[in-house]
Amino acid sequence: MTAARDAILAAIRRSLNRGPLDPATAAALRARVAAHRRNLIPMRAAALDHPARVNLFVAMAEAVQATVARLSSIDAVPEAVAAYLAAENLPAELVMAPDPGLDQIPWEMRPLLRIRRGRAEAADAVSLTPCFAAIAETGTLMLASGAATPTSLNFLPDTHIVLVPADRVVGTYEDGWDRLRDLAGECGEVGRQLLPRTVNFITGPSRTGDIEQRIVLGAHGPRRLHILVVEDGGA
Amino acid sequence: MEAKSRDFSASARAGLANDNLQQALDIMTQRGFPSRRLEVVARLPEFEALREVGREIKDHTLAHLDFYLELYEHNVVASGGEVHWARTPEEACEIVLTVCRTAGARSVTKGKSMIAEEIGLNDFLEKSGITPVETDLGEYIIQLRHEPPSHLIAPAMHLVKEQVADAFRSAHRTLDPNRPLAEPQALCDEARAILRPQFLAADVGITGANFLIAETGSSIIVTNEGNGDLTQILPRVHIVLASLEKLVPTFEDAATLLRLLARSATGQEFSSYTTVSTGPRRPGDLDGPEAYHVILLDNGRAAMLGGEFHDMLRCIRCGACMNHCPVYAAVGGHAYGWVYPGPMGAVLTPSLIGIEEAAPLPNASTLCGRCESVCPVKIPLPKMLRHWREREFAKKLAPRIWRSGLSVWAWVALRPALYHMLTEVASRTLGWVGGRRGRFRNLPFAAGWTGVRDMPAPEGRSFHSLWAERSKAAGRR
Amino acid sequence: MAESGTRVALFVTCLVDLFRPTVGFAAVELLERSGCTVEVPRTQTCCGQPAYNSGDRSAAKAIALKVIETFAGYDFVVAPSGSCAGMIRLHFPEMFADDPANLRRAEELASRTWELSAFLVDVRGMREVAAQWPRVATYHDACSGLRELGVRDQPRRLLGSVAGLELRELPGAEICCGFGGTFCVKYPEISDKMVSDKADDIVATGAEAVLAGDLGCLLNIAGKLSRQGRSLETRHLAEVLAGMTDDTPPIGKPR
């Protein structure tokens, strides 16, 4: 293995007509990485005030066949979930991320809703997860894996419901990732971040155009993505 | 994968005569990728500026590729993963096999990976007793049909839906043979149902990577189906196959390129699933792989650096070039004979398998430049096609008759008096023979032309001879 | 004939020279109307594209040096062809990138070289022509002119001023017609598919005539339309703008 590694690095340097980088250049590159400066950011979501950002998020998400319900408070969630499942003719049961924030929801208001907490299993038809952030520029959900947010919930069930507190709506992917960096605890030295194993940027339900370029939903991931935007913050 | 690029002309002819393929290509050109790209680009005023930034990011990374690879490796290891370096397809395949055997893998799922095609991974694994299951719908379809992909993004785009239905009926024997399979939705639903157990049973999941981030040691996959994600979160082991030039320095750099990628590829603002993976599962995680292996493949990339084809390493595998190429739209992807079709394939393939093997590819182009005009990272594809033609010329790979003909032409072009005399003779002769009809149906020395179209007749005198006469008459220069 | 400080050398192009001198005379007419004096250097032959695109760089360079010599001293060099003008403007400097002395000369020539319609509109400020040509016509954008030189609006602007001419946009105008120099005879079946698609698009506009700024494309398109037995007229942009459509039949049509 080391032989291949050395050979490849040597081949790269030979082609670039130089030896290993001098210390000053290497330091400059490390500094560039540590600074992780943003490149050109499209204006679309960058300069909006919060309400406009949320509206943009909703519009972009709906444009890619996600469905969105806007709720005034976290107390409205159980009713919204129950109503959605009934409207889609789905059984009133779901698997939920064991996230403390979701436990705050008054589920007792809908006692017929059967809720299991944990990762997704093959038989699960509906999942409910929180999100790490919601990206307005393309209606994209940013979900981060963790002990309370298993990734399988995002992909195995046919229907995926995501709770988006309005204060989690940000403008751009870079805004979302900066929040992740803050959370992971960035130290001055590169490589010491503790990122989640998986960060998903999800834009609409699963789809494919592989057959005659006709878009159909529900290829392998969820065919339904239902987003609950809760105005008063919540979890 | 075995290369058949030498047979381009015959394959192209077969493609032109293939009605199903022509129907599929018409779908693409009439209502597919090009029009979708146009719409989505119109919605992003900064798109043109982003192309330039994308180019800069890639150029910067390539100029310091050794640094970024080492940083990337450091961060993969720091997050609990393993990095393997492979110079050749054989080395890469052996590493995959070793990881699979160490994991006691009986079943392996695969997301779409062009690198896997390049190294012939499926054949290699099958010979070693492991059958990888393709999970991307397009890849699954062509796996059933035992054929290679015909497009970077949509591997089965050469097929019409009836062909897909036939493949499913032949392969999925346990299902009711009379079930309706006329619509893409039905086919998609069936593939989903068939493949779901495979996802759940897999011991090892192999994916490619659209980008690798040096800053964090992460790999990024960009998909729409969710198969790549199920491939990389359910099994115990996740293997990432990536070539060296997939590196970018930071997440911000990746975000810029991601803004270009989906728009250029499918005309989407963003793909359904763009996933950043870093190492194996964390302590406390309820799912995710226990082991994360990245195989970095060279296979000719290091040699391309700093040379005439350096710019080709910027490619982010979007497929825009082939979507807009009139030659690709005429003959389809299989004609190119290897993993990478279209304009990027015509430039990259000779670098990876040698110009002798890939000789026809750089010549099968009018150099119209439409590819370059849509490339998100501004790769000068026509220029590099010309570079390959220069290499072929130097190696005398073109047929002798062409080389002689061109030599004669160039020789005459340097001798104006002779040139003008010959032009006047030719124009008078052809003008006289073409005569009143104004065109030739048949010109023996130009059968390539007159085989399919008429040749308009010259007016009968050359411009220079007429100009000389009229100038003399008018007393001017 | 306007005496003017602006001396323009006409780059005739091989195809105009051999097949259709009328285009050259139309170009001269238009250049003179825009107030230039036009000369035709006798020692010009070819821009070297066939050699350059076939990978024979040394022949291409030899021809380029001859072109540089031949066209020295004129204020401008104008070609009724985007591909020849593009060759001189873009590819001559490329060819001499590692030859500083010749690079300077190539860049100097490149800076004075123009495709005809771009020269008339962008340099001479021409906004209209006096011609009339009552037709419904469509326009094909030759690839080099379009992508190497940005020639797109200029022909349309001038054609828009031709009395009686209704110009219909050609869907896929920017898609290659399949000529590509030697490509059309090296890969005849592929070229045929491309020119057939182009012919279909042209016919579908309902136009009676098709125009373009490059004779290579025009010979290719006219040849295909003729083989299909179509009555459509194919002409070079310059002939129409100069009002010389009576001087010669459409390309490929009987006298």
Image: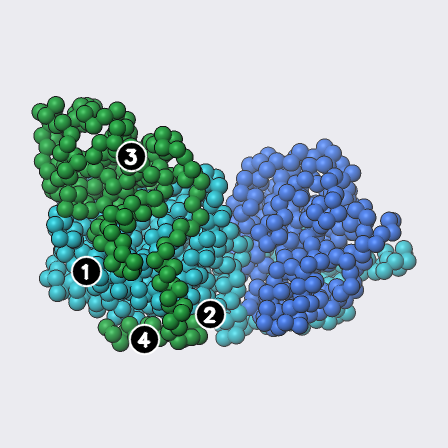
Chain colours: A green, B cyan, C blue
Whether discs 4 and 2 lie on one chain: the answer is: no
What's the CA distance linking mark 3 and mark 2?
Answer: 50 Å
Using residue A148 as the reference point, say whether residue B59 is left or right of it: right
Q: Residue A7: which disc?
A: 4
Residue at point 70%, 35% (across, down): C165
Label disc, if present, on residue B307 of the rendered structure: 2
Q: Amino acid at mark 2?
A: Gly
What residue is shown with label 3? A167
Q: Amino acid at mark 3?
A: Asp
The type of residue carrying mark 4 is Ala
**Crowding at label 1, few (<14), some or many (≥20) Cα neighbours within 10 Å?**
some
Which mark, residue B80?
1
Q: Residue at x 67, y 44 (%)?
A: C154
**Parent chain of label 3:** A
Chain of the residue where label 2 is placed in the rendered structure: B
Q: Nearer the viewer, residue C225 or B213?
A: B213
Name the spot of residue C47 as percent of width and height, x first. 67, 63
Q: Let me know if residue A62 appears in the view.
A: yes
Tell me which numbered mark, 1 or 2, is placed earlier along the sequence: 1
Which mark, by number, is residue B166? none
Residues under labels 1 and 2: Cα distance?
36 Å
Question: Dot 1 lies on which element?
Answer: loop
Q: Is residue C182 left or right of residue B338?
A: right
Q: Are marks 3 and 2 on the same chain?
A: no
Residue type, mark 1 in image? Gly
**Could you classify mark 3 by the number of other residues whose Cα lies within 10 Å: few (under 14), some (14-19), or many (20 or more)?**
some
